[in-house]
């Protein structure tokens, strides 16, 4: 029973209409809170008085959040827990489920005007509530056209450094004073290098920054042929010379074909699921070995067989996820621009930002969490994204310029500002599966979007 205090009449029971009104206000308050939450989060909040369950996932889906209908029960978990059919709960949604009849009625609050997914299709009657303000703030790009004479690169570089440094600081909350090491999943490309550069003034002087670089091969000499290994070594030398007071360590993670097969079957496939494409397999395996953080400690001039094997003690692992989506890093952005014009490129960038959670981040969170590390994606920090979305395209990328110059232009300018050599900041993007050479261990005729049969069979055996 709910009671209401009235100064003149004492305390009385609320009427049914008043109870309903209070519950409606409470539900509205939760929905309002959902649109204001920042960071990496997912929750299930059950209110028995309301007979409702609130199920929410952060705007970019940085936390793994899966669901299954198993024996007519709704099961929600960050990991697959049984043999039912599992799917991702859509990122950026607050779903309100009726406890009295779980599969009949559901309300979904989201920034999307259209949301077709296995999640919404599983319920009989779904009512959508679109948060226009959330969509505008977190997914809408500035379409203002800037002419070259209007762009002040130096001013934009300073603003980038300020805003991205704040994003890194927010990632370090609750860790900075209690950690002796931080990990960066380090390809040597511009995204991970910039994280390593801007961490320098933010960490304690005794803190170690582990730069974890992964390469795959059939023979020992294959590892040092991997483009990511070559890039990472050059980037490490730059960091070491630029910031001699900070202890950067380059960890060389060398993965043989045999170890890849064993670990995929024993651990990785079950963590990647329900993702199941060839690309999911490649990236998920790279991320798993990187997050494990076990490799040879690089020392200049030492032969490989004399390097010691260590494991990073870092509790957080920084990744460069989101940089390509926000700053025009993919070849398809350039192709859209050349084929269909500026607005087509912006449309593609908006679309990819909307699906990054289901496509990448849930999977990456699962493989990272397996090693008891927390994944941090500073390029997808909510406040940083809000700032970056307001930048005109011409500040972020210039698709009229060659590869290695035009895409992610502003990140390249920041690294140039820090004195990075041209061979580092002007290197074109290379996909992770080719940079690490994991693709060399698989079938040559496979396409990234194909269903990965070895992943499916391994996952079935693991679950």
Image (cartoon, rainbow, N blue to C red):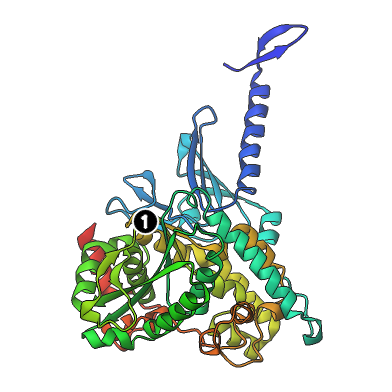
Residue at the far front in the pictured view: 245
Judging by the rendered image, the residue that carries numbered circle 1 is 369
Q: Nearer the viewer, residue 359 or 453?
A: 359
Q: Closest to the observer: 255 or 41?
A: 255
Q: Position of residue 303 (x, y in %)?
A: 25, 83
Question: Quadrant of residue 33 in the image?
Answer: top right
Query: Residue 341: horizontal and vertical position, in percent?
Result: 68, 86
Q: How many marks?
A: 1
Q: Nearer the viewer, residue 365 or 355?
A: 365
Note whether 12 is above or below 133 in the view shown.
Answer: above
Say what secondary structure mark 1 lies in.
Answer: helix
94 left or right of 179 in image: right
Q: Residue at image x 59%, y 51%?
A: 38
Q: Position of residue 400 (x, y in %)?
A: 66, 91
Residue 80 point in image, percent of width and height: 32, 54
Work out whether residue 200 can be spotted.
yes
For this orientation, the residue located farthest to the top is 9
Query: Can you say which quadrant of the picture contains the N terminus?
Result: top right
Residue 113: tell me if it is visible.
Answer: no
Q: Is residue 336 above or below residue 287?
A: below
Q: Is 417 on the left-hand or right-hand side of 371?
A: right
Image-based side of 76 in relation to 327, left or right: left
């Amino acid at each position: 029973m709910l009671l209401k205090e009235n100064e003149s009449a004492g305390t009385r029971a609320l009427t049914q209409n008043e109870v309903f009104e209070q519950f409606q206000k409470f539900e509205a308050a939760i929905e309002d809170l959902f649109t204001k939450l920042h960071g990496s989060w997912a929750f299930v909040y059950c209110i028995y008085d309301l007979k409702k369950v609130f199920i929410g996932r952060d705007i970019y889906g940085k936390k793994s959040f899966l669901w299954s209908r198993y024996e007519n029960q709704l099961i929600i978990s960050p990991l697959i827990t049984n043999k039912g059919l599992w799917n991702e709960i859509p990122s950026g949604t607050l779903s309100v489920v009726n406890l009295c009849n779980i599969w009949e009625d559901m309300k979904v609050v989201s920034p999307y005007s259209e949301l077709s997914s296995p999640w919404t299709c599983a319920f009989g009657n779904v009512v959508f509530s679109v948060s226009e303000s959330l969509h505008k703030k977190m997914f809408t790009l500035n379409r203002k056209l800037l002419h070259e004479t209007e762009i002040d690169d130096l001013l934009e570089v300073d603003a980038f450094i300020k805003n991205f440094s704040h994003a890194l600081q927010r990632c370090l909350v609750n860790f900075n004073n209690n950690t002796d090491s931080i990990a960066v999943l380090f390809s040597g490309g511009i995204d991970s290098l910039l994280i390593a550069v801007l961490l320098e003034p933010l960490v304690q002087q005794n803190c170690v920054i582990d730069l974890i670089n992964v390469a795959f091969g059939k023979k020992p000499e294959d590892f040092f042929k991997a483009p990511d290994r070559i890039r990472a070594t050059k980037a490490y030398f730059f960091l070491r010379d630029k910031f001699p007071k900070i202890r950067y360590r380059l960890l060389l993670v060398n993965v043989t074909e045999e170890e890849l097969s064993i670990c995929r079957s024993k651990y990785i496939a079950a963590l990647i699921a329900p993702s199941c494409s060839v690309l999911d397999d490649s990236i998920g395996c790279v991320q798993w070995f990187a997050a494990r953080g076990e490799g040879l400690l690089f020392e200049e001039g030492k032969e490989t067989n004399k390097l010691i094997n260590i494991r990073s003690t870092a509790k957080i692992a920084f990744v460069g996820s989101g940089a390509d989506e926000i700053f025009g890093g993919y070849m398809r952005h350039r192709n859209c621009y050349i084929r269909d014009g500026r607005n087509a490129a912006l449309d593609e960038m908006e679309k990819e930002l909307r699906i990054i959670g289901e496509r990448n981040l849930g999977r990456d969170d699962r493989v990272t969490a397996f090693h008891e590390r927390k994944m941090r994606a500073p390029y997808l920090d909510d406040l940083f994204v809000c700032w970056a979305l307001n930048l005109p395209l011409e500040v972020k990328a210039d698709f009229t310029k060659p590869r290695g110059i035009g895409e992610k232009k502003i990140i390249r300018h920041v690294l140039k500002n820090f004195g990075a050599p041209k061979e580092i900041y002007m290197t074109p993007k290379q996909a992770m599966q080719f940079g690490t050479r994991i693709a060399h261990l698989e079938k040559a005729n496979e396409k990234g979007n194909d269903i990965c049969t070895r992943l499916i069979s391994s996952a079935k055996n693991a679950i």
